[in-house]
Amino acid sequence: MPTPLALGVITSVQPDPNISLASVKSLGVPTIQIDYPGSLDNESGIAVLRRALAQARVEVTSVVCGFAGDDYADIETVRRTIGLVPEATRAERLAHVEKVAAFTERLGVTRLQTHVGHVPEDATDPGYPGVVAAMRTACDIAASHSQVFALETGQETAKTLQRFINDVDSPNLRVNFDPANMILYGNDNPIQALDLLMSFIDGVHCKDGKWPTEPGKLGCETPLGEGDVDFASWLEKLIVLGYQGPLTIEREIHGEQQQKDILKAIALIESVLAGVAA
Ligand code: MG
């Protein structure tokens, strides 16, 4: 287990984990969440990854399970394509969850994570029971590999997510709270949402963004502290409410600017942590 409130980033470890981990090491953070690396899902790939992690002294806190066909272009496309919500791809995607869970266990990691998709806000929606059942199956798969299954927030309101978690009623279902997503999808206030979801949160994304300005479009992700999350207040409240898990920075751009933005995010988080401790 990482130390409480350990800093981290979300990253790919493909094609060569040594290159990704050199970049993580240069940031000086001790934890990562990784996207499921299909090209390393074999005996030698896992050995290479384990060795690279040990050498870098970096701990994987969760493996993120995405799906072929996931598309985040706009709100309507998200509703149609993401996660376990679309019925047409549900069976093959649950098979993929099994594959990712097996890999995650071989890597020695006990937390899976995904975007389940746009959970219907209306519990009488005819599609709702199927999403609940699929989520329960995904949790059972994770449990059979000794894992929790964490849902990313944001594609629905906190109230809907809370109801969904209660309806799924699986003991290993958790929340990976991404405060920016609530804003980017135009759904909820991430500071108030902590009140509803706190007891399920075992991971977070430190991410920021602006509210959408056009109907049907997502808002715009920003460097941490420059969006509408009020990140410092959000993090203070999270910690005051008792959160002790990792603080995983997510910045969805690439290259040199991403590294610069992450370094600024680390400084911001450290200043909030110092303020809370004082
Ligand atoms: Mg996120």
Image: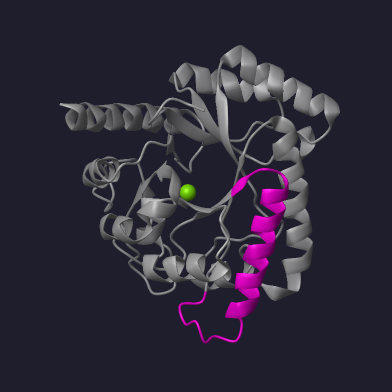
The reply to whether the magenta stretch includes residue 139 is yes
**Rendered location of residue 164, percent (x, y):** 50, 69
In terms of depth relative to the viewer, which is nearer, 255 or 119? Answer: 119
As drawn, 26 above or below 188: above
In terms of depth relative to the viewer, which is nearer, 28 or 5? Answer: 5
As drawn, 54 above or below 235: above
The quadrant of the image that shows the C terminus is top left
**Rendered location of residue 95, percent (x, y):** 79, 57
Question: Residue at the spot x=48%, y=33% of the render?
Answer: 9
Magenta residues, start to end: 120-148
In terms of depth relative to the viewer, which is nearer, 130 or 199? Answer: 199
Question: Residue at the spot x=47%, y=82% of the render?
Answer: 122
Q: How many marks?
A: 0
* Coloring applied to the structure: one colour
> On the rendered structure, is 201 left or right of 46?
left
Q: Residue furthest top?
A: 55
> On the rendered structure, is 58 left or right of 176?
right
As drawn, 206 above or below 106: below
The reply to whether the magenta stretch includes residue 200 is no
Q: Residue furthest left?
A: 278
Question: Residue at the spot x=43%, y=60% of the render?
Answer: 154
**Rendered location of residue 252, percent (x, y):** 48, 43
Is residue 4 visible in this depiction of the protein? yes
Is residue 219 visible in this depiction of the protein? no
**Rendered location of residue 54, percent (x, y):** 63, 16
Question: Image quarter for residue 147?
Answer: top right
